[in-house]
Image (cartoon, rainbow, N blue to C red):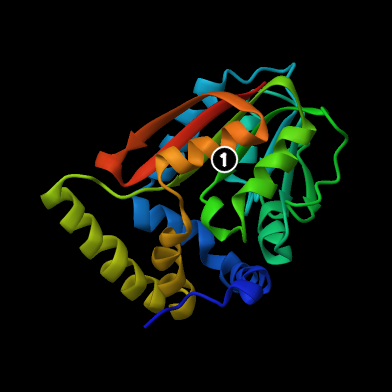
Amino acid sequence: MTALPAPEEKAAAVQRMFDRIAPRYDRMNRIMTGRMDQRWRRSLVERLGIDDEDRVLDLACGTGDFAEIAREHTRHVIGLDFARGMLHGARARDLGAVELVQADALRLPLRDGSITVAVSGFALRNFVALPPVFAELARVLAPGGRIGLLEVDRPDRGVVRLGHHVYFDRVVPFVGGILSDRSAYRYLPQSAVYLPDKHELARMLRDAGFRDIRKRRHAMGAAQSITAVRA
């Protein structure tokens, strides 16, 4: 049985879902990944070479995990999300001078070329369509600006792929239903179908104006991180 909303309902449904699960979102991420999600974020920030000259956007920031890590490297960090509940969670953390903004990824309240680095964690499959999001990121990034995208993935190898399927598609919804929100944690694994394969994703990024697109896999292929540079 699908937990995926109709295309015309996706944006509103995802917003309501993240508002509901915000109070337990961090706890569930740590449980589901064994805290590896934070390790993947730190690794991606290091690969992007963020320093205090950078102006960083954490797109779909949630409760501010990426923003908090980026803040260790630069004073100039903006966390943006369209779910008010997630931003409440971010404000409850000690994020220092991070600016938190509620806005739509398709209409970023930022000037052209005003950002030098953009990061986003586990958000791609929640957007209605990726090309307009990438185009908007390209607009606000200065030439030579970098992006880092962290997302789920599926292992290629047989036994590993089967084990991941059992865990991600069976265990995660079961545990999420007990500890958080049943419908949300049925949606989250199923939403991986929204992710294009690596070739299609790379094409979308190139069409939006990015180059030097590189992918790294984590946890034997259970997660992926992608970096690219604004042409």
The residue wearing badge 1 is: 204
Position in image of residue 100 (x %, y %) = 78, 48
Q: Is residue 207 visible?
A: yes
Position in image of residue 124 (x %, y %) = 55, 51
Q: Nearer the viewer, residue 227 or 72?
A: 227
Tell me: 125 left or right of 144. Answer: left
For the N terminus, give its image quadrant.
bottom left
Position in image of residue 171 (x %, y %) = 27, 68
Tell me: 113 left or right of 4. Answer: right
Residue occupying the point 43% across, 71% down: 185
Q: In the image, is residue 128 above or below residue 226?
A: below
Position in image of residue 16 (x %, y %) = 65, 74
Residue occupying the point 49% across, 41% down: 201
Tell me: 228 left or right of 109. Answer: left
Please, which residue is most extreme toward the left here? 159
Q: Nearer the viewer, residue 60 or 29?
A: 60
